[in-house]
Image: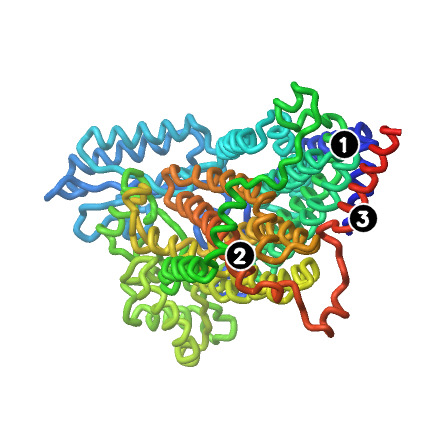
Amino acid sequence: MAVFLDRLGRLAFRRRWRVLLMWVVALVAAGTASALAPAAPDGSYSMPGTESQRAFDLIEQRFPGVSVGGSAEGASAKVVFVAPGGQKLTDPQNRSVVDEVVSRVGKVDQVVRAADPFEADADADAVSEDGSTAYASVTFGVKAKDVSDAAKQDLEKAVEAGRDAGLTVEVSGSVLAAQPSGGATELVGVVVAAVVLLITFGSLAAAGLPLLTALIGVGIGTATILALSSALGLSSATSTLALMLGLAVGIDYAMFIVSRYREERARGLAPEDAAGVAVGTAGSSVVFAGLTVVIGLAGLSVVGIPTLTQMGLAAAGTVALSVLVAVTLIPAMLGIFPRAVLARAVRRSGARPAADAEEPNTGSRWARLIVRRPLPVLLVAVATLGVIALPAVKLHLGTAGDESKPTSTTERRAYDDLAKGFGPGFNGPLTIVVDARSAKDPKAAVDATAREIGAVNGVVSVSTPSFNKAGDTAIFSATPATAPTDERTVDLIHTLRGDRPAIGKATDATFMVSGSTAGNIDSDQKVQGALVPYLGLVVGLAFLLLLIVFRSVLVPLKAALGFLLSVLAALGAVVAVFQWGWLAGLLGVDQTGPIMNTMPIVMVGIVFGLAMDYEVFLVTRIREAHLRGERTGQAIVSGFRHSARVVVAAAVIMISVFSGFIGVGETLIKMIGFGMAIAVLFDAFVVRMTIVPAVLALLGERAWTMPRRLERLVPHVDVEGHALIGAAATDEEERRDLLVR
């Protein structure tokens, strides 16, 4: 591997302009294809294998054009009215205000229907029993993303008119869904990365090169995804993970190779030789780190959720592209600017950099401190992460809705007003789909099913069933007594499904429980059930790959266990803050609740990729020193001397990028940003920079051994480039001798 990559790096160095042209052409071609391709379809979140999905499919089949949530195409909204204390909306003065607001809303551009709660065409029971609360259902003729700003402003003006008249008026619905702005967070991340790289390398060119190559790789990857979105049915959200992770690993991989190039120049190698050795050594680490990331992302397919599968495979392709960019475009750019990536003082003096490889730095001092006291350091680090991980035992997955938004938002206030006026279960009704094809009298069978379900403890009311054209299938709503995220609602859904055989036997019809609430619960349980198998798959495959890289059983085992520890600690921190409310005020979290169901798995995929980057780069340099004859303790110090600064810089960049999301108003976004930032913090600084050297110091020479039978089976891969370094040094000495002669 190292020899092949060395030759590839030298070839790219010599054919620098051709390689650069090739990648520029690829970027332009991908960008042109994405610009000309049809727009990506809207995300259709499906959950194969769940009852709610089967019910949804049956509705699509027998009720063409009708969705569980209402209109299949147009955006929707609910305008919620609450009368002043002690008054009713049915009072003439208040009712006239409601009528006026609904009339104004109905005249808003793109609105096709605004149902007055007091009119016959309104939803059934659109006014609460005590008359204090009512809502008007509003339907738009366009999708939520296509609702114009002018229409939203006119809707807000109509609402303000009702408030000015003395009523409490709030709005909820898909029309208010925030559309991704894009670019701002990534721009902040790029700026932070530039500053950290500049501090790390002390050179504008060295700082700019990783950014440039990472942006080229991510640009080609995301443009290709957008170009294929329509043909492959990819949703617009597919490129999100690819963009985030592609930028992260692209910067990391380039940093590793550029840093190694600077080191080899410091050892006295010529530019082409230094580029070859850098790609052959650091590039080998990049290739294997990239393979582990691809494994982790492709492993998202085992979850069985098409959206996550698409995101994982798209991100895996982008990471693979980032690896290819790193081992070809980086040496080509080094060929174009062989001295520009060196420190400014060196460029100005015109002298060859002094070899300072043996001088102690912060990384070597830290490693020496750990090597002296490995057991106490290990125990403290593991115990700390173990304590932080304890709340993860109480992890409760859910789907974020309006109830999780800050009370400063109108959506949250509308949610609370509806719950107060109509009961907590009003915000999450269950959709019951009755299949009465086998019944002699379908209508009687459906009515009997509705009565049986309405009599179940925990169901407040059921609506009048609506039949399809054939009259053999019906839909009605069952309103729970508890809120959508309440555990008692989960129990109710299980009870209804458990009672199905008995009810079906009594009514001659079968039914399924669906709707957004049931769908969210099914989704939570499916993801929670897939979390452990997913972790097992990615950790197991990564173990096998690292077994080949390091030719050791204990080193990959340590890497896998360390990753699990950092992920569990991160999940524990997320549960403590966002589910239990610890330090919630400090982070601006207004509402605690369940953890978003897909967040843990996505976090595992991203953190796994970054963790393996840090693991491979750190341990490869340690093993490289060990192969040169150093004992394990000294090899740890040597490895940290060369790699700690780059790993710390990469981790700081990622933590800064993810922390930027914590300042966003949405609790969901805060959760993602906090979870990713704390996970990288734990993995980079506690696991890789502390636990890894402590474990290696305790293992000593045993860390680099494996059973003889296994050693014969495992292929030998020279990731450290042991042969390359000696050959390059010999060639350089021969050149010097020739010059002297």
Local secondary structure at mark 2: helix
Locate residue 347, reporting x and y percent.
Answer: 66, 22
Q: Residue furthest left?
A: 86
In the image, taking residue 21 as reference, residue 527 lies left or right, namely left
Up-down relation of residue 339 to residue 366 (above or below): above
In the image, taking residue 615 as reference, residue 327 lies left or right, namely right
Q: Earlier in the sequence, mark 2 or mark 3?
A: 3
Local secondary structure at mark 3: helix
Which residue lies under the disc numbered 2?
Answer: 692
Q: In the image, what residue type sits under mark 3? A: Val
In the image, taking residue 594 as reference, residue 17 lies left or right, namely right
Q: Residues within 10 Å of mark 3 (few under 14, many from 20)?
A: many
Locate residue 408, reporting x and y percent.
Answer: 28, 38
The quarter holding residue 248 reads top right
Which residue lies under the disc numbered 3?
Answer: 3
The Cα atoms of the two marked residues, 1 and 3, are separated by 17 Å
In the image, taking residue 156 as reference, residue 241 lies left or right, namely right
